[in-house]
Structures are given as structure tokens and as C-alpha cells.
Image: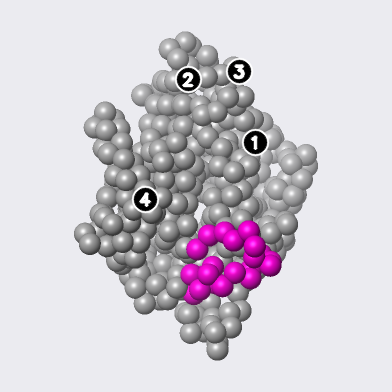
Amino acid sequence: MKTILFLSLLSPVAFASPLVDWFGDHDAKVPDFTRALSKEEAVKAKAEVWAAYEKHARKEGWEKEFPLKDEGMDAWVKERKIQPLIADLGKKKMPYLIIKKGEKPKGGWPLFFALHGGGGNAKAEGPHTWQVNTREWYAQMQLTTKVYEPAGLYVIPRMADDREGRWYYGYNQVFLDRMIRRGILFGEVNPNRVYLMGISEGGYTAFRLGSLMADRWAGSCAMAAAEPLKNAPPENLRHVAFRCGIGEKDTMFDRIGLARTYFKKIEEIKKEAGSGYQNFFDEQAGKGHGIDYKPGPTWIAKFQRNPIPKQIDWTVIRQHDRSRDQMYWLGLTGEPKELPLKLTAQIRGQVVGITSDGPAKLRVLLDDRLLDLDQEVTILVNGLAKFQGKVPRNLAGILKSTAGRGDPELVFPAEVILEE
């Protein structure tokens, strides 16, 4: 019998080193990297790999980016001087606060990203010099501490560059992904209770990244904002509780018109789909760009993410300088040559059915939560059989998916890569 990396067979000191090393260098050798695992072995391996991932994270000092403190706004703000944490995003620096509100629910903290309004000013003298964004950042803190009701951890970032002023840009996507990982590892965050919300400029991104990064969110809430359909494909929101609060008189940039069109389309999709699509359109009578912000966070907080839905609707687009390479258990190897790319995928029994309206190199990530990996699996693409056979569980799949998402609910021990 081969030696394998399980606690039952090896001490923590013996098994941790190669796994921890792999997270720092993916070319590092790991014993039995591709050996087929049983269902029980895969469960144990997931736990051990996650423990190694946490050790790697501490080795890298990631816990400093998500300190759990008992302070609210008064402890962060003294004489109108903020002492924030700073996220290093390469050429950009992102100031942010983490505010704890209420008592931790059973199952872990909900995590809310609260994006302020404001926007961009090309004439700003520096990345953090425009007082409009600073004022809106303070307003978001006030709302968090005095208006928003749900208990949770609230990450409140300040715009990284006032001269650009867009929350959906690539470096903001990096920040959101990073903070979700850190929160799960070090903030006792429930990975199935992560929420995105924003006001005005931040609300545009609750549309855009709510759709683009759908597999991250339990819910997304846009306030005083709306987007055209092409900027935030609504079909991607099948498993995201999505809400928009907007004033009926918010006519600048046709915000109210865009919002009505967007939710009309969601209702059409919902009727055709037959399931999924939890949504709420809160058109506030008599209101303009200023609305009642209280109900939105409370509504989305009622929902939890299903990390392994058996039906996926995914329109792949670019936001700023990047697209996503994974949505739940469906992935891409490289960006498709032509975008947008519309994909649907469903699992029925032991059959995975995928439709694609263009060429793409697909990755199918599998787990026993989705189907029985001890039995043969059939994968169809546009009705044609592209794979039939058993898909082995192995350590390679567990390591790669753990590193890829940093989310214990999105760890998959088996993978099939399909050529175009």
C-alpha cells in the first residue's frame, strides 16, 4: 500500500510540509498527487489541504489584512481622521475598514462589502484627494453603524483612485476576491453568507460584479443605481438574491428606466427558467437619487449561497481588464476568443449537459455532492458526447481548486478538461 497524506497515517508535521510548500510553488512535489482517492479519502484530504492552505496564508502574513477587532465607527474615526487598513493592489492602494456589528450568528459571520458612491474626477491631484469620495466613504460608515440592521462584518473600502473612480475595475475585483479569502480564513466568515452592496457608483458595481462574480455571493443589493443589460447579464444571477432600491424620480442617466428594463428582463428569464432567481425591485415613490437605504441589506441577508447548484447559466463577459474563468463548477481554460460567450450547464443523474454558443475550452469540476464519482459520468456539449467514463478523485484537484478559489465550499477533487 502506498503512503498517502492523511492524518491517520502521517503526523501533521510529516504531511504539512509538502502541501504548504505547494501553495507557495505549484511545481513543488507532492506525494501521490494524482493517485485516485476513495470518497472517504477525498473528504479527509479536503480537510488536510485546507489546513495546509491556512498555514501557507499565515506564512505569507495574510491574517494582517483581516484583523478581527471589536471596534465600531467611533474607534476608527477620531477627530475626522481615519486610520484605515491599506490593501496593496500593485499600482493602486485601497484604504478600507472592517467594522463588526452585532453578535456572530451560528455558522459564522456574514460578510458585507459596502461600496460608497461618488465616482471619478480626472482632475483630482492624486488617488485619494477628491473630497466627494472621502465624504461618501464617511457616509457609508455612518450607514453601516446607524442604518444597516444585519449583524455581520462590514468591509468598507475607499475608492483606490479618484482619477478613475470605478468600482468594477480589475484591481477592485482583486480586492474583493482577496478579502473574501481572508475573511473565510481569519474572520470566521461563513462562505455561503457573503454579500455585495453599494450606493450610486457602488450600486452600478452591485449590478456588474454581482453578475460577473455570481458564485461568490449569497446576495447583491444595488441602491440608487442601474445598469444596461449588456453590462451585467441578468441570467448569471440565477442563484444570487438580487435587489435594487431606486427612486421613481431618479432620471439622471436614465437610472430608473434602466432599472425597470433590467427587472422586467429578470422576470422574463425567471418565468422561462421555472426555478431560481430570487429578486426584488424596490421602486420608491416620490424619491429621487436619495432613497431609504435601510431595507436592502436586511432583505439580502435572509439568503444563503448554494455553492454547488446543478443548473448554471453563465454569460462570460469582460469587466474592465479581465473576465472570470470559473462559475461554480464550470470553468474555462483561457479566455474565449469571442465574447460574450453564453454557457448553460446542468447535471441530471450522472449526465452533465453543457450548451455553448461559441468555441471554448471547458473545465468541468466535479464532486460527490453533485453526482456519484464511483460511477461513470457522461458529459455532453451541444448534444454531443465529449466524455464518458469514471473521473478519479485526486489530491491534484483538491489542491488546485483550493488555491483557485480559497473557498472550502468550492473545492472539487475531480476535473475533466474538454477540448474545443
Amino acid at the residue labelled 2: Asp
Q: N-terminal of the two: label 4 or label 1?
A: 4
In whole angstroms, how far apart are the C-alphas of marks 4 and 2?
Answer: 31 Å
Q: Residue at x 63, y 59 (%)?
A: 122
Q: N-terminal of the two: label 3 or label 1?
A: 1
Q: Secondary structure at mark 4?
A: helix
Residue 310 magenta-drawn? no
In whole angstroms, how far apart are the C-alphas of marks 4 and 1?
Answer: 47 Å
Q: N-terminal of the two: label 4 or label 3?
A: 4
Q: N-terminal of the two: label 4 or label 2?
A: 4
Could you tell me if residue 336 is visible in this image? yes
Amino acid at the residue labelled 3: Glu
Q: Secondary structure at mark 3?
A: loop
- Where does label 4 land, which residue? 255
- Where does label 1 land, which residue? 396
Instruction: Depth check: give the residue in front, 332 or 321.
Output: 321
Amino acid at the residue labelled 4: Arg
Q: x, y (%) of residue 196?
A: 44, 55
Q: Secondary structure at mark 1?
A: helix
Q: x, y (%) of residue 321?
A: 63, 42
Q: Secondary structure at mark 2?
A: loop
Contact, CB < 8 Å: mark 1 with mark 2?
no
Residue 125 magenta-drawn? yes
- Where does label 3 land, which residue? 419
95 sits to left or right of 285: right
- Outermost residue on the bottom side: it is 79
